[in-house]
Image (cartoon, rainbow, N blue to C red):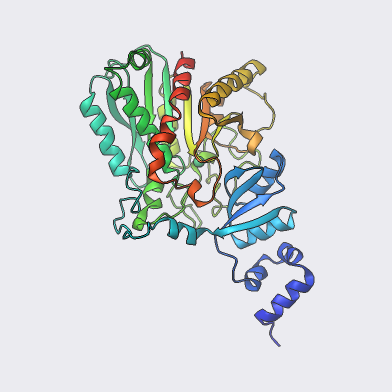
Amino acid sequence: MSITRRSWRAIAAAAGLALLAATAPSAVAQTDQQVPERGLYHVRGADDAAKRTAVARTGVDVAGTENGALTVVANPAQAATLRANGFTVDQIGDFDALLKQRSVVPGQARSAQADEFPSGDEKYHTYTETTAELKQVVADHGDIAQLSSAGKSYEGRDLNVLKISDNAATDEDEPEVLFTCNQHAREHLTTEMCLHIAQRFTDGYASDPKIKEMVDGREIYLIPNVNPDGSEYDISGGEYQGWRKTRQPVPGSSEIGTDPNRNWDYQWGCCGGSSDQPGDEDYRGPSAFSEPETKAVADFISSRKFTAHIDFHTFSELVLWPYGFTEDDTAEGMTAEEAKRFQDVGKEMAGTNGYTPEQSSDLYITDGDVNDWAWGKHKILSYTFEMYPKSGGIDGFYPPDEQIEEQTTRNDQAVDILLREAG
Ligand SMILES: [Zn+2]
């Protein structure tokens, strides 16, 4: 007699789903057809950094935090493992179904174009539109703005670099500040953040003495799309894909994409802060700087003398500083005095935008991220901002475009503080 689906259910009920889940994850999928392939969950019980790191290490995609709960995207086996490990796991919904819903504005036809945001979100800039906008900034303000490329993405897109400074064509002896956006593909609000900085410092130059002083005294560099292949893929077909990683195929695997923010060559893969499984959302890549995008941006950074940096992400409304690879405040290359400076400046910036300031590893351990590399290799005062919203489900990744102006303007003072600190 073969074991039918019904009898699997009976076995699962008798044995307790958690036990069965721990020993035979594949059977769980048979017992419950309602478990989505990619489910959005709240995970409770991960109330310290070690436990949150344990959650991340199951390979789930940790999207954000909410009142002590983690919002994660997980497959059925991962959800079962989390429950077996004692976490409370509440399903919010089917991630792919939510993505489809989010991609359609009632009463409006879905955009059929590959290179446009879903209807209703057109104020977001595609890579093509972002590039055009940067070219327009240079056309309007050629004396203080210059466009170049840090290199090419895997699919051959330019990694645009906008420089803003007085005498932009000249490499002057002024402190250099860097803003990077869109390492993670679906975090489109961050590209808007870089564009907002570009517009503010160029449009305001002639009329605002404070902006003129900052532009004259600094060399400001912006990279609005660190991962343009990923962000274009994320809106392909006029629907959000929920994509985080790059688009380079993983050698020896059927999987595509590496988490660029686990791919930087400082303590890469050292400490349980990334995954070696190509299918996982925080897969660190086959080697440090395996991704053309991180390699090119790292080479660009190394070619300059940056003193301060913000890497923009979404979401959770956090100001984070290194190190991510260790829970300790200090480590090799981070003295107590240096750690205190990160804390002081981080808290000052957070005081202006209402974000929560903390060391990156207070959230959970990450290794191979850009902040650890920028500080560890180059002593750059390097922060991550996790932007709006503070918490959420699917809208956490895709806030409506009505939020763009408010949520980018919200960081103006923090950006100014970073420019000051660069000196
Ligand atoms: Zn991110």
- Find the residue positioned furthest to the right: 14
Residue 402 to residue 251: above or below: above
Residue 246 to residue 201: above or below: below
The answer, for residue 307, to whether it is visible in the render is no
- Find the residue positioned furthest to the bottom: 1
421 relative to 337 in the view: left or right: left
Residue 179 position, x and y percent, is 42, 28
Residue pictured at 35% horizontal, 33% vertical: 195
Residue 383 position, x and y percent, is 53, 28
Residue 132 position, x and y percent, is 25, 38
The answer, for residue 34, to whether it is visible in the render is yes
Exactly how many numbered labels are in the figure? 0
Residue pictured at 55% horizontal, 63% vertical: 37
The foreground one among 22 and 351 is 351
Residue 83 position, x and y percent, is 71, 57
Residue 132 to residue 321: above or below: below
51 relative to 184 in the view: left or right: right
Can you say which quadrant of the picture contains the N terminus? bottom right
The foreground one among 11 and 256 is 11
Q: Quadrant of residue 348?
A: top right
Residue pictured at 52% horizontal, 58% vertical: 95
